[in-house]
Amino acid sequence: MIGIIGAGSFGTALVKVISRNSPVLVYARHEALVNEINHAHSINGYPVREHVLGTTRIQDIAERCELIFAVVPSSSFREMMQELNPHLSPAHMIIQCTKGLDVRLHPGEDLMTMKITRDKVYTMTEVIRQESNVVRVGCLSGP
């Protein structure tokens, strides 16, 4: 089973492609969306195969899937990794599918006035390495 964290438009597109050849477990924050996946076999009205399942428990993804696609906004990527990390092992593989960067602000700083230096800006792959023990990391990006 392959895990997908995030059920937005890109996550849904990945579900539709990956589920052609493999069962998929989708993590979504909203119970109503998970119910739609599990009972109506659709995501936001788009039909998905019956072997696509949904969960609101992020630990289910780590427990049931060795290959995980992380498809969440960059603004919540680090927080998602911190929540997922206790359930991960080096055997997992994470493919990050997130556009953007993680910018670390110190107390009192704001993005508009701070001096941006390399030590404050991280790619999502760097965030995965900082926040977990996963060693197999990849990136999938779109247009």
Image: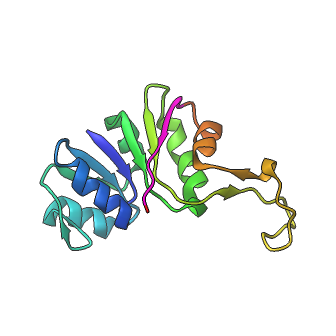
* Image x and y of residue 94, in percent: 45, 39
Residue 66 x, y percent position in the rendering = 36, 33
Q: Is residue 114 left or right of residue 25?
A: right
Question: Is 104 on the left or on the right of 28, as rendered?
Answer: right
Count of marks, rendered view: 0
Instruction: Name the residue: 60% across, 63% down.
Output: 75
Q: Nearer the viewer, residue 2 or 64?
A: 2
Locate residue 35: give its quadrant: bottom left
Residue at 44% over, 48% down: 140
Which residue is found at the position 43% from the left and 34% from the top? 93
Q: Where's the C terminus, which quadrant?
A: bottom left
Of the pair 7 and 124, the residue shown nearer to us: 124
Q: Which is nearer the eye, 41 or 58?
A: 41
Image coordinates for residue 129, horizontal then vertical, percent? 61, 37
Figure check: 88 above or below 119: above
| Magenta residue span | 134-142
Q: Nearer the viewer, residue 6 or 136?
A: 136
Name the spot of residue 104 as percent of width and height, x first: 75, 56
Identify the colour scheme used: rainbow
Q: Is residue 41 magenta?
A: no
